[in-house]
């Protein structure tokens, strides 16, 4: 990181602007954390536990361009070109965005000395997005209430996002260690 006298400053708030290096770190932390979540999802899949269908996430996002945000049942919506790839891209972009929010809340010093509790707590908080935005918009209801096993699905979501939070810490720790 550049010494403070070399950082760009936003003249409206006098807050130091994050450096390009910091943006790179945030992106790597978000990618690493999302990959950690994916490892968790893969492990669950090997154990026979159903998981997120990223094609359906891509289908949901693909319909935004058509002006449709909410669906009665996303699997019955018209397929969109490249929906699986779009779903995976969306998944990783969201992971990077969440990493940026964590660093905005914790400060860039957290990237140099990451701690587990804020990362895991933040990961747990991010489960609000699927519970209150994605699932209702995709036809599963708030807190997966329109699924056959809402509590089971919510607990599964919670484990996914806890794994993401642990991944935030692990990815940031690996980067901090590599920088030493």
Image: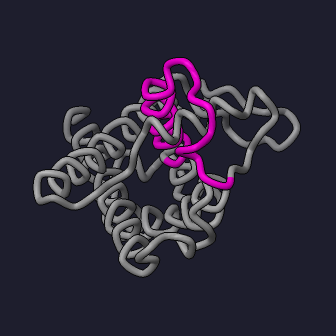
Residue 74 in sight here: yes
- 156 with respect to 41 (left or right): right
Vertically, is 41 above or below 126?
A: above
- Identify the image quadrant of the N terminus: top left
Picture coordinates of residue 7 (x, y %)?
62, 28
**Going 56% across and 75% down the picture, which residue do you hit?**
145
Residue situated furthest front in the rendering: 76
Residue 2 in sight here: no
**Going 67% across and 55% down the picture, which residue do you hit?**
72
- Identify the image quadrant of the C terminus: top left
Vertically, is 103 above or below 18?
A: below
The main secondary structure of the magenta stretch is: helix
Picture coordinates of residue 124 (x, y %)?
44, 68
Q: Quadrant of residue 47?
A: bottom left
Residue 77 belongs to magenta span: yes
Residue situated furthest bottom in the rendering: 151
- 168 with respect to 45 (left or right): right
**Going 19% across and 57% down the picture, which residue do you hit?**
44
Vertically, is 91 above or below 44?
A: above
- Range covered by the magenta-colored residues: 72-98
Residue 4 belongs to magenta span: no
Residue situated furthest top in the rendering: 81
Picture coordinates of residue 51 (x, y %)?
32, 54
Instruction: Please name whichever residue, 101 or 47, is drawn nearer the observer in this view of the structure.
Output: 47
Residue situated furthest right in the rendering: 12
Picture coordinates of residue 14 (x, y %)?
79, 41
């Amino acid at each position: 990181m550049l010494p403070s006298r070399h950082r760009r400053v936003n003249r409206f708030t006098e807050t130091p602007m994050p450096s390009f290096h910091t943006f790179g770190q945030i992106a790597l932390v978000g990618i690493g954390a999302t990959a950690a979540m994916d490892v968790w999802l893969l492990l669950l899949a090997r154990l026979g536990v159903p998981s997120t269908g990223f094609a359906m996430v891509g289908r949901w996002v693909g319909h935004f361009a058509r002006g449709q945000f909410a669906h009665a049942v996303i699997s019955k919506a018209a397929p969109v070109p490249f929906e699986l790839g779009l779903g995976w891209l969306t998944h990783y972009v969201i992971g990077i965005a969440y990493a940026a929010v964590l660093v905005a809340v914790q400060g860039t010093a957290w990237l140099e000395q990451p701690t587990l509790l804020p990362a895991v707590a933040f990961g747990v908080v991010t489960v609000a997005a699927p519970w209150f935005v994605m699932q209702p918009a995709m036809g599963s209801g708030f807190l997966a209430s329109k699924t056959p096993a809402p509590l089971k699905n919510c607990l599964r979501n919670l484990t996914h996002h806890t794994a993401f939070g642990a991944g935030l810490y692990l990815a940031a720790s690996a980067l901090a260690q590599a920088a030493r």
